[in-house]
Amino acid sequence: MSERIHITTAIFYSNGTPHVGSAYEALAADVFARCQRRRRGRENVSFLSGTDEHGDKIRRAAMAEGLAPKAYTDKMSVLFRDAFKGLNVDLDYWVRTTDAVHEKFVQRMLVETQAKGNIEFKEYEGLYCVGCERFYTEKELQQPGNLCPTHNAPVELIKESNYFLKIDQFREQVIEKIKRDEILIRPERYKNEALNMLGEPLSDLCISRPKARMDWGIELPFDDQYVTYVWYDAFWAYVSEPASRLGLDVFMREWWPTTEHFIGKDILKTHAVYWPAILLAAGLPLFRSLNVHGWLNFGGSRMSKSSGNVRDPVSYEKAFGPDVLRYFVMREVVYGLDGDFSEERLTERYNADLANDLGNVVSRVLAMAQRYFNGKVSESPEIPDLSLFLTKKIAWSDLLELTERVNDDVTKELDFKRALEKIWAGLDVANKYIVETAPFSLAKDPAKLPQVAQILANLLEAIRVVADALEPFMPVTAGKIFDLLNVVDDATKRAPYGEGLKPGHQVNAPVPLFPRREKLAAS
RNA sequence: GGCGGCGUAGCUCAGUUGGUUAGAGCAUGCGGCUCAUAUCCGCAGUGUCGUAGGUUCGACUCCUACCGCCGCCA
């Protein structure tokens, strides 16, 4: 049996609508998940996402719309789920922190953690920022006036009793795990940052709120005057549903230790410091890795609601066609670094890569197959002897084992960009091969038709392999290409080069996959 | 203030343990082909590799200082 793997996006805080940045994270995780499914089989991969629906900010957002919190999050959660669905993010679990299954699970973890003596009840006086929903030390605040560094607003002095998680006891252990890559943080730059964050002793982590002040959370099983919410609550969304469905023991043994979290760099600290501590405090094993990505900016500046440049990802997918946003963010952004999104750039990529390269090469090959042989493949594909041509840049090897090499880039290096570059190198080879062999010239001489048949068999097979390698990135497009090639069974789709299309196979006439667009023709 | 990252062709970036004329894509110019979505192929470039020193037979690649941008921590 292949090793199982659990993959998650962050659990999205549902006080706003999904934007291109949240879509980016879901898309990266989705491509990763699809590559893993090809390796291990669908039944050995679990891909989870969901919405974080508790806390003061949600309650306030709901009130602002005149809705009960639950009614509000019902609406928001669907927006996220449908946005991801619209981008063909293929999830196995969609978790909501207000689901009964989840709430019950969090309560169970609280009981476990308390039984282990890792929760303490104590009075606390501190400076609290409502916007951040957290306490600050005076040193962290901007002076004068004790201003919250994030909201630039005064904090309140609050005195209350709360439940705290004693996490400093786990600090050394977490440091060791990160140093030894047992918690693998990549790209490596973020590993150093995480270790930095663990350099100082950790103060106890407050995990409750008195209902009197904030009741939109999960009631503590050992004190009905308190709720838990946001971080403590949301982390468990990675676990609650699958653990409830499969049984906690089974899930923890077979799935959890291989967990790959996809997160943004803004929540590195919570995931590298607090989350391991929360798990250890509950007596549970740790996840395998944190895959940290940067921001997706818009036209050079940070995408945020306040600057009014939030874009709805699905509108781009609709305007440009399926798979286009998927292609763009995976090709354009280096995983781990900030990237930039703009309609201009999207249009450029669309025309240069999708219309001119991918769409056109499929079109020209199928057109020749149709014109010269009525779409019939009459030779077995071979690896052409390229030494026959004078041009030296051609390497048919770019097309051999393409899927495996692309898969490695994604699963081992998180290098989505390089993976796509390899696929496009394959398209280059096909185009150069056409120019060098000029089948359209050979076809004028009936005696040379067998040669043409061989060239086209090679090219059609090359396109089939490209579609196969492209599938995790552009599932709809890959499907269209397979339809054009009239390939229906998985065995043929996934065959190594040379073992796919057979003589006698019939392919269809071309249909433009990506019609060229005028610049800035979006929306 | 402490730690770390980045600064390479007009634009976006690659450059593995220091070694021959520093690369790719896009954009630009010229030439070729006509099967194809006016697409494709070839050729041509331009770069004081942030600045100033240092180590070395030799540095984009190592060291030091400085400038600029950014992140994390305080």
Image: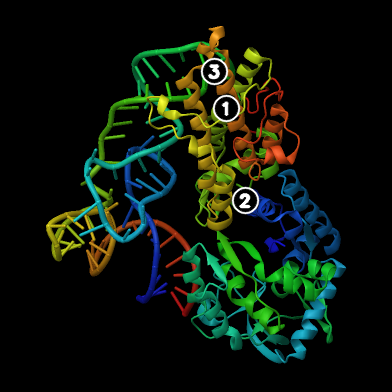
Q: Residue A219 appears in which quarter of the rendering? A: bottom right
**Front position among marks 2 and 3:** 3
Is there a contact, CB below 8 Å, between mark 3 and mark 1? no
Q: Position of residue A262 (x, y in %)?
A: 62, 61
Q: Secondary structure at mark 2?
A: helix
Dot 2 and dot 3 residues touching (CB under 8 Å): no
Q: Residue at coordinates 57% horizontally, 64% vertically from top-left? A: A266
User: Height in image: A120 above or below A329?
Assistant: below
Residue at mark 2: A24
Left or right of residue A15: residue A367: left
Query: Residue A357: horizontal and vertical position, in percent?
Result: 54, 29
Locate the C terminus of chain A by quadrant. top right
Q: Tell me if residue A245 can be seen.
A: yes
Q: Which residue is mark 1?
A: A459
What residue would you read off at disc 3?
A451
- The answer to whether residue A202 is seen in the rendering is no
| Horizontal relation, residue A359 to residue B6: left or right | right
Cα distance between the residues tagged 3 and 1:
13 Å
Q: Along the polypeptide, which appears first: circle 3 or circle 1?
A: 3
Badge 3: chain ID: A
Specify which label sits upstream in the sequence, 2 or 1.
2
Which amino acid, mark 3?
Gln
- Dot 1: what SS? helix
- When the figure is inspected, residue A122 is found, relative to residue A440, above or below; the finding is below
- Could you classify mark 1 by the number of other residues whose Cα lies within 10 Å: few (under 14), some (14-19), or many (20 or more)? many
Image location of residue A8, percent across then percent down: 68, 61
Chain letter of the residue carrying label 1: A
Closer to the camera: disc 2 or disc 1?
1
Q: Amino acid at mark 2?
A: Tyr
